[in-house]
Amino acid sequence: MSDLKSALGEAVGAAFASAGLPAELGRVTPSDRPDLADFQCNGALAAAKAAKRNPREIAQAVAEALKGDSRFASFEIAGPVFINLKIAEGALSARANEIAADPRLGAGRVAAPRRVMVDYGGPNVAKPMHVGHLRASIIGESVKRTYRFRGDQVWGDAHFGDWGFQMGLLITALADAGRIGPFLAEGDGPFPADSPVTLADLDRIYPEASAKAKADETFRDRARKATAELQAGRPGYRALWKHFIAVSRASLEPDFASIGVSFDLWKGESDVDPLIPGMIAELEAKHLLVDDQGARIVRVARNDDKRDLPPLLVVSSEGSAMYGTTDLATILDRRREYDPDLIIYAVDQRQADHFEVVVRAAYLVGYAQEGGLEHIGFGTMNGPDGKPFKTREGGVLKLGDLIAMTKAKAAERLHEAGLGAELSEADFGETARKVAVAALKFADLSNHRSTSYIFDLDRFSSFEGKTGPYLLYQAVRVKSLLRKAADEGVEAGKIVIVEPAERDLALLLDSFDSALAEAYDKKAPNFIADHAYRLAQAFSKFYAACPILIAQPPVRASRLALAEATLKQLELALDLLGIETPERM
Ligand code: ARG
């Protein structure tokens, strides 16, 4: 089963071939002038150039060859170059029925499924999440779902930041505060089974320690030493570190869950620590590792680079593994455990150089095939000052706080719009959460990921305009219509496309597969977001122009089926964006 664009493209291609021209030139695209045509083919000009023939003649020959095909209602040669195609109602109705009966709502699968790892979210022990993590979570989740839906075998990994300098900072600060006496003992323990710190402690201590390390060199050196000792396996530090991890993870997981983000793997940077000695030996054996002022690095810069790239720092002068060390070892680990064809890193664009360096090093050492590692960067979510969003107090964002704030706003909006009044308190809360998640995620995903945008809760949470809440509202409206139809015993039937608004809606349903393919190829969920929005708008117009429940039975059954298919496709598109639709509002 294929969409109309492909099916018609094939027919037009065959017509090109029958006129002695290359079939690929018969490709059709949705019309630039939907008022005049449904699809267009622009290949006549290229064909004319190549064959040194008149483009109009070619277009005429192609149109002639297509005459017997009942799927076309009309062809028109526009200007010297375009063939404008209007699809016949019968063919459009057939396609609409096919989509309505398809559990995948007209969406195809990739021809050759791959094994894909999506590295996203990227939370850290003790460090609060910032907007980069929020975007990484939202974009990565959608890319993961889209890849899985299109047929790849996909794993999403949080790549928990649990091995870096922040650990040494915490240990040193807590030691100075006299909080971790028993863990400072040398030797094998045993050490206390209860955490000496809560998350609130970590939240407070980490930024203080981080600021102190910038100002106080002695403190910084002690923190570096503590990091190296932890990594070298000092038992008391390891026991303490496990508490940090458990405490951080226990608070992060429910926050992620509340915005519909869930990881298949929650591996930490530390998990690849055992692989590092072997990796270093391999880098040495391949003559890739060089000594540089007490550190050990891999040079990846090339003569034709447009910007200066630093080397990959593998071992610091204190002997610690760095961010890039664990990233490289993680590629090795993933190859051994999952053998992915592709690893996608959904990480802030500000880390583009880091990934360029890691990726080059991985290709050099042979841990991945050229093209098998891809960083998909994104811009920032900014505050009104145009700089990365901060809390009113100037601090970094805590995911939990952002969700609470957005949920309160969603509740206010629901009240304002007179929605949700019949819901129980618990259902209302759950609906407000879904509206909040839709507001946050849709605002993010409706832009191409490379654009930065300003966090504007008033606009994001509005039920009007190109927003998540508008889409949920439209979906809920269809749900209530379908419930009413069920109550009245009205059943959906065969779809027959007649009215212009029905045509538009059916054509849009048909274009779902193209939108998904584009989102997949470009790793850009905004194509799905756009589709969802256009679908909701087309439904709205259809609903205004084509009464459903009061129509005559066959028309009523057809329109009801169209509404049902629209709802299912809309919910599926939203699900691929990571947005849940409530039953009622
Ligand atoms: N934890 C990192 C940070 O906060 C992000 C991790 C991204 N993934 C990776 N493989 N480096 O910046």
Image (spheres, rainbow, N blue to C red):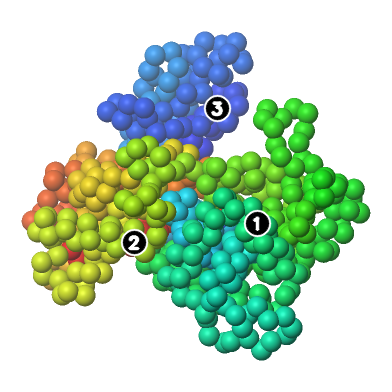
- Numbered tag placed on residue 218 in the rendering: 1
Residue depicted at x 54% and y 55%:
212
Front label number (1 vs 2): 1
Q: Earlier in the sequence, mark 3 or mark 1?
A: 3
- Look at label 1 and name its amino acid: Thr
In depth, the one of 305 and 297 nearer the eye is 297
Please name the residue that numbered disc 3 is placed on: 25
C-alpha span from label 3 to label 1: 69 Å
- On screen, residue 270 versus residue 302, left or right, reads left
**Would residue 289 be seen by someone viewing this image from the given angle?**
yes
42 in relation to 567, above or below: above
C-alpha span from label 1 to label 2: 35 Å
**Snapshot quadrant of residue 483:** bottom left
In depth, the one of 235 and 563 nearer the eye is 235
**Within-10-Å neighbours for mark 3: few <14, some 14–19, many 20+:** many
528 in relation to 156, above or below: above
- Look at label 3 and name its amino acid: Leu
Q: Earlier in the sequence, mark 1 or mark 2?
A: 1
Q: Earlier in the sequence, mark 2 or mark 3?
A: 3
Q: Secondary structure beneath disc 1?
A: helix
Outermost residue on the bottom side: it is: 190
Instruction: List x then y, in percent, for residue 359.
Output: 70, 47
- Numbered tag placed on residue 401 in the rendering: 2
Front label number (2 vs 3): 2
Residue depicted at x 13% and y 46%:
544
- On screen, residue 352 versus residue 279, left or right, reads left
Instruction: List x then y, in percent, for residue 316.
Output: 75, 54
- Look at label 2 and name its amino acid: Asp
